[in-house]
Image (cartoon, helix red, strand yellow):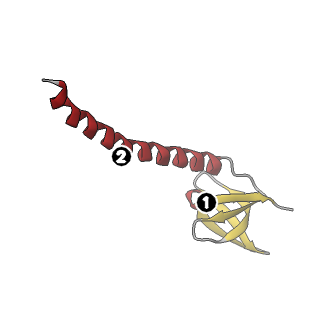
Amino acid sequence: MTFEELLPLALLALVFFILIVRPMRARQKQFAALREMQNALQIGSRVMISSGIHGTIRELEEDTVGLEVSPGVVITVARAAVAEIEGPQA
């Protein structure tokens, strides 16, 4: 095979890398950061879950979180639903 025959194949591989592999790596990094944040949850932290509900963590279990959304109202949500830590309770 000559260089001219390999050039289209090399360009195709480069386009595949740019359009498929790089974005996939970026998503994996974001997922790892989210998983790390969810594993670092602490009682008393203010959080927002993926549905947009804000609350304070009152209970922590392996797969669930007790989230106080109003004084005396604690709901149980999946730990994976926590999308953002807002900070410790003031």
Q: Which quadrant, please, contains the N terminus? A: top left
Residues at marks 2 and 1, CA–CA distance in whole angstroms: 26 Å
In this view, which residue lies farthest toward the front? 4
Is residue 55 depicted above or below 19 in this figure?
below
x 87%, y 62%: residue: 90
Give the camera-side residue of 25 and 12.
12
Q: Secondary structure at mark 1?
A: strand
Depth check: give the residue in front, 62 or 36.
36
- Circle 2 Cα neighbour tier, 10 Å, few/some/many (<14 / 14–19 / ≥20): few
Q: Is residue 27 left or right of residue 38?
A: left
Residue at figure coordinates x 57%, y 61% from the top left: 81
Residue at the image position 61 percent from the left and 60 percent from the top: 83
Q: Residue at x 57, y 48 (%)?
A: 35
Q: Amino acid at mark 2?
A: Ile
Point out residue 39 in the picture as x, y percentages from the top left corner. Answer: 63, 47
Which image quarter: residue 22?
top left
Q: Position of residue 52 (x, y in %)?
A: 62, 71
Residue 29: give its label. Answer: none
Position of residue 18 measured from the top left corner of the image (x, y, whole percent)? 38, 43
| Circle 2 residue | 20
Compared with 28, 67 (above or below) is: below
Amino acid at pointer 1: Ala
Q: How many marks?
A: 2
Count residues near mark 1 (Cα–Cα under 10 Å), then give few for <14, some for 14-19, many for 20+.
some
Classify mark 2: helix, strand or loop: helix
Residue 9, above or below 72:
above
Q: Is 7 displayed left or right of 84 in the figure?
A: left
Question: Which residue is under mark 1?
Answer: 83
Between 37 and 15, the one lying in front of the other is 15
